Image (cartoon, rainbow, N blue to C red):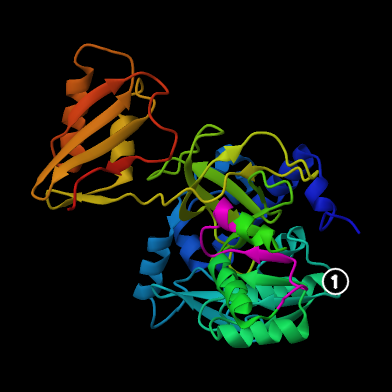
Amino acid sequence: MSKHYDALEIRQPAEREAALMAALPAQVAHAQKNSPAFAKSLAGVDASSVTSREALAQLPVIRKYELLAQQQAQRATSVFGGFAAITFGKAMPRVFASPGTIYEPEGARPDYWRMARGIYAAGFRPGELAHNCFSYHFTPAGSMMETGAHAIGCTVFPGGTGQTEQQVGAMAELKPAGYIGTPSFLKIIVEKAAEMGVKLPSVTKALVSGEAFPPSLRDWLAERGIAGYQCYATADLGLIAYETEAREGLVLDEGVIVEIVRPGTGEPVPEGEVGELVVTTLNPDYPLIRFGTGDLSAVLPGHCPTGRTNVRIKGWMGRADQTTKVRGMFVHPGQVAEVVKRFPEVKRARLVVTGEMANDHMCLKVEAAEAEGLAQKIGEAVRDITKLRADVTLVTLDSLPNDGKVIEDARSYQ
């Protein structure tokens, strides 16, 4: 049986890019017409001209906190804040809630969240039983995985969360081929089974998500006969990227356009540089255009050894929202980016906050060649934009860490 879910995964990169860019103008136009929120934010945009990544990068980024704010402001008239293109009824079998509270629609299409591709890459095949331990209430994770497994042809046991002993009992009797859920809960189940003296030989694979999956836990599971693979998905977007047996980063899903931008901005960074993941989904029901996930990652060079030709990312590398409070005032990554914009000779910058409570100190490290008066001018710009003073230190090009951090809070809180 093929190790690839479909032929889309092994397309020539140029063919894929052409298909995505061909679909992009129609999706932008669809969002403008059917999503009141995007009708407003994309007002005046000629959708037919958005046929390249360069054109896409000119559109505004909608970040999660903005989506939440619009939903909260419009609760009485539109629980989705005007972002959804469908309404309650047959077109929307379920609606879910994420912390905040953010409400997400689930459309009626099979594999609505596009999870089948990631589940298949983890080794699940038609005719197998998947033991799904993601939550089935409030959040969409349980449904995301179940509908994806059904698209493959798997039967699903809706284990949900908790009730560890009952989970062990169900696994022992139903003999599922694999587990789907958080990695930490799988470890708890395996440990409980050992404590109970129950063997679970049928469980040989797992697709995990929702939290970090360190190599130490991956190896721990492998020692017990379980090959664990991770995927990266969100309640807003569905599947974004998934791990393969090559275990070299995560391969992007075929139904999304992913950009990596400098935190606090909408500007794409050079390939390999860490930045915020911004995703445009081709989902017509919830047509999010340039949705800022708030997560950091970076593009890996080359293609997956499994033959999949889509772009790979390193996986989750932290949060992009590094907003911090200095001397009673919030400082945002976007403000640092605004300082950098004023000086073309500056490549990158990093604001380091040190000191102790009530004695904060800011130092802006900038990658730039020495120039008379430059540090002073940059310091004046920092004060103008943030209303706070900062020392400015010029450092050599490419000397700042490539970790996506724009603001580093190095204060002592002891």
| Percent of width and height locating residue 80 | 47, 74
Q: Main secondary structure of the magenta part?
A: loop
Residue closer to the observer: 358 or 164: 164
Residue closer to the observer: 48 or 198: 198
| Percent of width and height locating residue 28 | 59, 55
Relative placement, left or right, of 374 versus 256 is left
- Image position of 349 with respect to 333: above or below: above
- Residue at 83% x, 56% y is 6
- Image position of 348 with respect to 112: above or below: above
| Percent of width and height locating residue 147 | 71, 75
- Image position of 47 with respect to 349: above or below: below
Q: What crowding class fits label 1: few (fewer than 14 Cα within 10 Å), some (14-19), or many (20 or more)?
A: few
- Residue at 53% x, 83% y is 162
For the N terminus, the image quarter is bottom right
- Image position of 273 with respect to 87: above or below: above
Relative placement, left or right, of 103 versus 250 is left
**Magenta-drawn stretch contains 309:** no
In the picture as drawn, the residue positioned furthest to the right comes out as 1
Secondary structure of residue under mark 1: loop
Residue named by callout 1: 126
Count the numbered circles shown: 1
Which amino acid, by three-letter code, is at mark 1? Pro
- Residue at 34% x, 40% y is 406
**Magenta-drawn stretch contains 207:** yes
Residue closer to the observer: 183 or 329: 183
| Percent of width and height locating residue 342 | 30, 29
Rendering quarter of residue 382: top left
Magenta region:
199-217
In the picture as drawn, the residue positioned furthest to the left comes out as 358
Rendering quarter of residue 159: bottom right
Residue 399 appears anywhere in the view: yes
